[in-house]
Amino acid sequence: MTSAMISSEKTAIELRNLSVTYPGGGKNNKEARAVKAVRNCSFSVARGNIVGLVGESGSGKSSALMAIPGLLPPGTLVSGQIFCDGEDISALSEEALNVWRWRRIALVPQGAMNSFTPHLSVERHITEVLTHHLGMTRREGRGYAAELLRTVGLEAEGTSSILDRYPHELSGGQKQRAALAAALACGPDFLLADEPTTALDVITQKEVLDMTAALVRERGMGLLLVTHDLPLAAGLCDILIVMKDGVVVESGPSRLLVGAPSHPYTRRLIEAIRSLEKTEETRETGGERL
Ligand SMILES: Nc1ncnc2c1ncn2[C@@H]1O[C@H](COP(=O)(O)OP(=O)(O)OP(=O)(O)O)[C@@H](O)[C@H]1O
Ligand SMILES: [Mg+2]
């Protein structure tokens, strides 16, 4: 990687030779065996781009994503570099990283809709981010939280009613939108979204993702979208990165990659798209939404 490339990536998150190793074995592995979840991965997410990180379960997508804001479990071994707008953030202290989190790089974690604290209202979830990271007062925070909820389309029944609700009083799609509102709260440059809609039905999933993509484009943010769903990523992302067993096996502009996959693993995934498209066609012609 040349220094010229470093300066050309001034408006991007760039991973260089990232490796992530869990020292004590896998999530469900009782043997004390190290798991090399990510191995020498290099890719970047430029502002204005939607990048899809795809691959089967266990391929290391979440590990790579969580390494960016430094949110891997304590004890995890991370090597390589992570640049954000040309600055190496991989060696920053926890305190310094906290300045980047939310304000520069915001996260919609895997299972975000289940990550709400049950006894805190939607308002509290969002205003805590605003008061903690932007120094707003609770009152200012409430006004801005209402605006954020409007931005993510949570206004149907009057924003104040959604603001005052507790997580269990929201549908899955509403929770996901609220999680997105919280992620957008500090006006980040980059959004990291880990399987943000997998628990939702197909139509709500598309609505939430289309809205996320529209907001990202409107604001010129960069989005790293982790999903095991290649058809979904192919339709939404500018660039696709395919991971398998911790390694990036292929990457490139979505259309090129889907049109002419070079790696056998990607070709197998594309086959899956074709059969899914056939199912979609049948669904569209046979069962239109009323
Ligand atoms: N906290 C952890 N401790 C130990 N091993 C872990 C931990 N988290 C993940 N792993 C292991 O690292 C590997 C990669 O996991 P990761 O969660 O990054 O995959 P993924 O591609 O996000 O999968 P999924 O699509 O199921 O979310 C797996 O073998 C997993 O068991
Ligand atoms: Mg994952």
Image: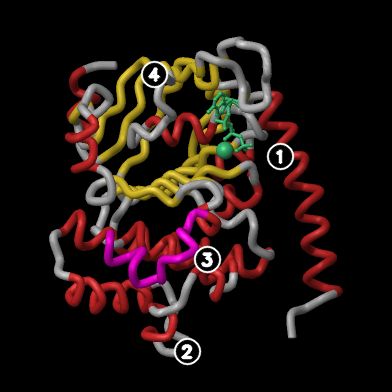
What residue sits right under mark 2 in the picture?
A: 157
| Quadrant in which residue 15 is drawn | top left
**Looking at this view, is 214 or 178 the one in front?**
178
> SS of the residue at dot 3?
helix
Label located before the other in sequence (1 or 2): 2
C-alpha separation, residue under disc 3 versus residue under disc 1: 24 Å
Label located before the other in sequence (4 or 1): 4
C-alpha separation, residue under disc 1 versus residue under disc 2: 41 Å
- Residue 279 spot, x, y in % from top left: 82, 58
Q: Amino acid at mark 2?
A: Glu
Residues rendered magenta in the picture: 115-128
| Quadrant in which residue 135 is drawn | bottom left
Query: Measured along the vertical axis of the image, is residue 85 above or below residue 213?
Result: above
C-alpha separation, residue under disc 4 versus residue under disc 2: 45 Å
Q: Which quarter shows the C terminus?
A: bottom right
Query: Measured along the vertical axis of the image, is residue 221 above or below residue 247?
Result: below
C-alpha separation, residue under disc 2 versus residue under disc 3: 18 Å
What residue sits right under mark 4 in the picture?
A: 78
Say if mark 4 contacts mark 2, CB within 8 Å: no
What residue sits right under mark 3 in the picture?
A: 208
Q: Is residue 36 magenta?
A: no
Residue at the image point whose x is 47% and y is 72% from the top:
166
- Residue 219 spot, x, y in % from top left: 29, 61
Ligand 2 is found in the corner quadrant, namely top right
**Looking at this view, is 176 or 255 the one in front?**
176
Q: Amino acid at mark 4?
A: Val
